[in-house]
Image (tube, helix red, strand yellow):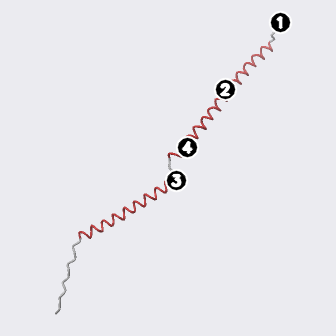
Amino acid sequence: MIEITPWFQIGGVLFAIASSILLVWWRLQNQITTNLSHAKEDLAAYKLHVAESFVTKQGLNEQTDRLMRAIEGLGVKIDRTNERMDQAFMPAPKPTSRAISR
C-alpha cells in the first residue's frame, strides 16, 4: 500500500485549488466571449436600425432647403394678394372729359 505523505496531501490540495481556479477562469472567459459576440450582434442591429430610421445630414439639408423655398414662395404669394386687395379697394380713377372742339 502507498503511504500518503504530508507532501502528497499538500500537492493534492494545491492541485484541487489550482484546477478550481482554472475552471472558474475558463467559465468566465467563455461567458465574456459569448457576451462579446452578442454585444457585437446587438451593435450591428442598432447601426442598421439607425441607418434605416434616422435622416442623414445631407438629407436634412435638402429637406430644409425645400421647405425654405416653399415658405419664400408663400411669402411672395401673400405679398401679391395684399397688393391685389389694395388695388381692389382703391377708388376707381374718374374719367376725364375731353372737350370736343368743333
Instruction: Identify the mark nearer the N-term, 3 or 2.
Output: 2
Other residues around mark 4 within 10 Å, as few (<14) / some (14–19) / many (≥20): few
Q: Name the residue under label 4.
A: 48
Relative to 14, residue 87 above or below: below
- Residue 95, horizontal then vertical, whole percent: 20, 80
Label disc, if present, on residue 1 of the rendered structure: 1
Q: Distance between the residues labelled 4 and 1?
A: 69 Å
Q: Of the residues shown, which amino acid type is indicated by label 1?
A: Met
Q: Of the residues shown, which amino acid type is indicated by label 4?
A: Leu
Locate residue 72: give its quadrant: bottom left
Q: How far apart are marks 1 and 3 (CA)?
A: 83 Å
- Residue 85, horizontal then vertical, whole percent: 27, 67
Local secondary structure at mark 2? helix
Q: Given contact means CB atoms under 8 Å apart, are the residues at marks 3 and 2 in contact? A: no
Q: Given contact means CB atoms under 8 Å apart, are the residues at marks 4 and 2 in contact? A: no
- Residue 78, horizontal then vertical, whole percent: 33, 63
Q: Which residue lies furthest to the bottom in this view?
A: 102
Q: Given contact means CB atoms under 8 Å apart, are the residues at marks 4 and 1 in contact? A: no
Instruction: Identify the mark nearer the N-term, 1 or 3.
Output: 1
Other residues around mark 2 within 10 Å, as few (<14) / some (14–19) / many (≥20): few
Of circles 1 and 3, which is in front?
A: 3
Q: Distance between the residues labelled 2 and 1?
A: 38 Å
Label disc, if present, on residue 57 of the rendered structure: 3
- Residue 42, horizontal then vertical, whole percent: 57, 37
Q: Of the residues shown, which amino acid type is indicated by label 2?
A: Arg
Q: Name the residue under label 2.
A: 27
